[in-house]
Amino acid sequence: MNLRRDVFQAIADPTRRAILVLLATQSMTAGTIASNFDSSRPTVSKHLQILTECDLLEQEQKGREMIYHLNPQGLKDVAEFIEPFAKLWDDRFNKLESIMKNYREEK
Amino acid sequence: MIMERKTKIHAENDRQEILITREFELPVELLFKAHTEAEIVEQWMGNRVLKLEAVKHGSYEFEATDPMGNKHRFNGTIHEFVLNEKITRTFEMEGTPFPVQLEFMNFEELTEDTSKLSIHMVFKSVEARDQILKLPFAQGINMAHNRLQEVIQKLN
């Protein structure tokens, strides 16, 4: 339950976001994913584990390798995906407020 | 990590609506004006305003350019227009499968110098609402992707 609340913490990390982007077009083995980053293999594995625990990735055992798929359905709860939407509107309204404050001063 | 925002978004699971509320340090007249004057809308929405007839039975059309340079158009019809009180309008993204949505915008005077905007958005389905809510999320991932590509291009 706590893990699901942490989806945004999971994607706040640039490496983890990059992993999601990498897997957006195709599924990959842990080794292939790690080869795309300068970080050590255990570090990348830790990132994969966090993303999997948040249901953003799905694991599939293929022989000795573990394949990772992106799971967009992982974002099930509104609270998990609403944050960028909220920020978008807050940024817009902050701008509106500052523009209209200046507008008032010019009058 | 998450700052307290002045804009509140109320969206419950399995409902086909969103409520956005925000209090402004502005008289309600200025808050309303920011929604009816094309040059002002362009500044805070970050879109081009191709058309904005802010009257009952009027309509609007905006054009946004994404970071890749693609242009996207939005349009809608204004159903109710009461100066400094409310605007009821539709919102549609042209050239996308997203169904039209309905927006009830209420402008409220709190004090002489403060006001509140409430936008009640109603969607065709829960799925349509969730897709719209996820758009900025997906764009965030795309922007991370673009930044990554820039970094890679600089390395080459």
Image (cartoon, coloured by chain):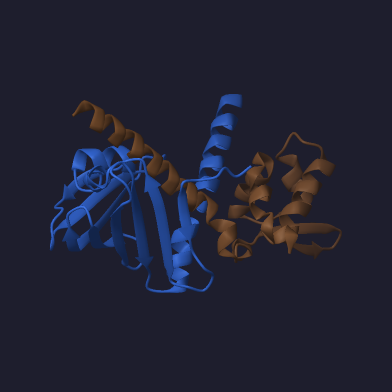
Chain colours: A brown, B blue
Q: Can residue B46 be seen in this view?
A: no
- Residue under the image location 33 percent in, 44 percent down: B114
Q: Position of residue A38 (x, y in %)?
A: 74, 34
Is B79 on the left or on the right of A55, as rendered? Answer: left
- Looking at the picture, does residue B39 appear above or below residue B13? above
- Looking at the picture, does residue B20 appear above or below residue B46? below
Quarter that holds the C terminus of chain B: top right
Q: Can residue A38 be seen in this view?
A: yes
Q: Nearer the viewer, residue A58 or B117?
A: B117
Q: Nearer the viewer, residue A62 or B128?
A: B128
Q: Quadrant of residue B29?
A: top left
Q: Nearer the viewer, residue B33 or A19?
A: B33
- Looking at the picture, does residue B72 appear above or below residue A102? below
Q: Position of residue A100 (x, y in %)?
A: 28, 36
- Residue under the image location 17 percent in, 50 percent down: B52
Is A10 on the left or on the right of B108, as rendered? Answer: right
Q: Nearer the viewer, residue B147 or B134?
A: B134
Q: Position of residue A80 (x, y in %)?
A: 60, 58
- Residue under the image location 52 percent in, 52 percent down: B137
Q: Where is residue A42 in the image (x, y as percent from the top left)?
A: 84, 43
In the rendered image, the residue lying farthest to the front is B111
Q: How many marks?
A: 0
Quarter that holds the N terminus of chain B: top right
